[in-house]
Amino acid sequence: MGMLTSLLVLSFLIFFHELGHFLAARFFGVHVEVFSIGFGKKVFSKVIGKTEYRLAMIPLGGFVQMKGQDDSDPTKVSNDKDSYNTKRPWKRVIILLAGPFANFLLAFFLYLAIANIGVTKFSPIIGSVGIGTPAQEIGLIKNDRVIEINGENVETWDDLSTLIKASEGKLLITIQRGKKVKTLMTTPEIKEIKNKFGESVKKRILGISPSEDTFVLQLTPVETLIFAYDETLKATTFIITSLQKLIQGIIPVKDLGGFVSIVQFTAQASEAGIIALLALTALISVNLGVLNLLPIPALDGGHIMFNLYEMITKKAPSEKVLYRMTVFGWVFLLTLMAFTIFNDIYRIFGGY
């Protein structure tokens, strides 16, 4: 079941990505010869109009083959009016950007769906207090509800964490204990912890943890849009930061995952419920959008790089250079794909 769900999720994301390219290409009058979900041998094919719509055996990607543009042979061009390569470079860049943009847009709609189904948050109710912590010293106890920090209203545990993290100096904490409201003052402890990337960072803490009490946020239509935008931005920032940490060597290459990891995570998310599955799908969609914008030949970002070069220099890259760089791009991507699959399998069998 997990494998089927993963294939459906991947196919859905790839379809949206390629649909972005397809719609932009047709908008600018470029003929699309093939719209394929997957690579390799055709499983299903149907010609509608002048475009062949195809399902292929390897569901690890897809492509829109436009007239005059072929990644398998970058020297293949056409001088017809409806050809990709006869369009001005800025139009080609928009066609190329449309795929990743479709992924970001899809993530936005998925987060919008989550907001409308119901976003569950931890209540700002204390579940436990650490011994010898600032919270214990000022008398905070289990079941105290934090209602304000430094005059700022607290509705969720996330609000509480954010306000403590952003604070400076002393904290003025207003709590509700039964029917009584008390205001207390303390200075958070600065503690060194590991962040999600394994880096040591200093964090201001009170020494409290949340109770198991949760509630569903009641959002207005405008607030759902803001939520979807914020979550899409957070996901994009997370993926970009992760790439940066990977390049810096902070995230080890052994942590890289591929198709097998996606299958595992998707299976777990589908068991956890529709919210978890939608959130994971949104994150993968953002990941697909960001990765496709990397300036690697054979990816959208690589093609954008070639077109920007043409816009700046007023001349196209030589066919020889274009061919060699595209071959290099494909070798790099296939090697990376093989490495991530090896990593996944090695991890499953306890190699790490």
Image (spheres, rainbow, N blue to C red):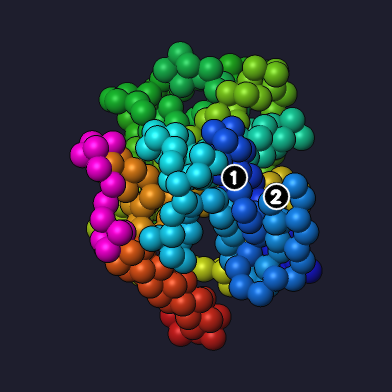
Relative image position of residue 306 (x, y in whole percent): 32, 48
Q: Is residue 63 magenta?
A: no
Relative image position of residue 138 (x, y in whole percent): 43, 30
In the figure, residue 198 lies in which quadrant?
A: bottom left
Q: CA distance from mark 2 to mark 1?
A: 8 Å
Q: Residues within 10 Å of mark 1 (few under 14, many from 20)?
A: many
The answer to whether residue 206 shows anywhere in this view is no
The answer to whether residue 331 shows anywhere in this view is yes
Asked if the residue at tag 1 contacts the one at tag 2, i.e. Cβ–Cβ closer than 8 Å, the answer is yes
Q: Residues within 10 Å of mark 2 (few under 14, many from 20)?
A: few
Per the image, the residue denoted by label 2 is 50
Relative image position of residue 104 (x, y in whole percent): 54, 39
Which is more toward the observer, 27 or 240?
A: 27
Check disc 2 and report its element: helix, strand or loop: loop
Relative image position of residue 310 (x, y in whole percent): 28, 41
Per the image, the residue denoted by label 1 is 31
Which is more toward the observer, 70 or 77?
A: 77
Image height of 47 relative to 110, above or below: below
User: Image quadrant for the C terminus?
Assistant: bottom left
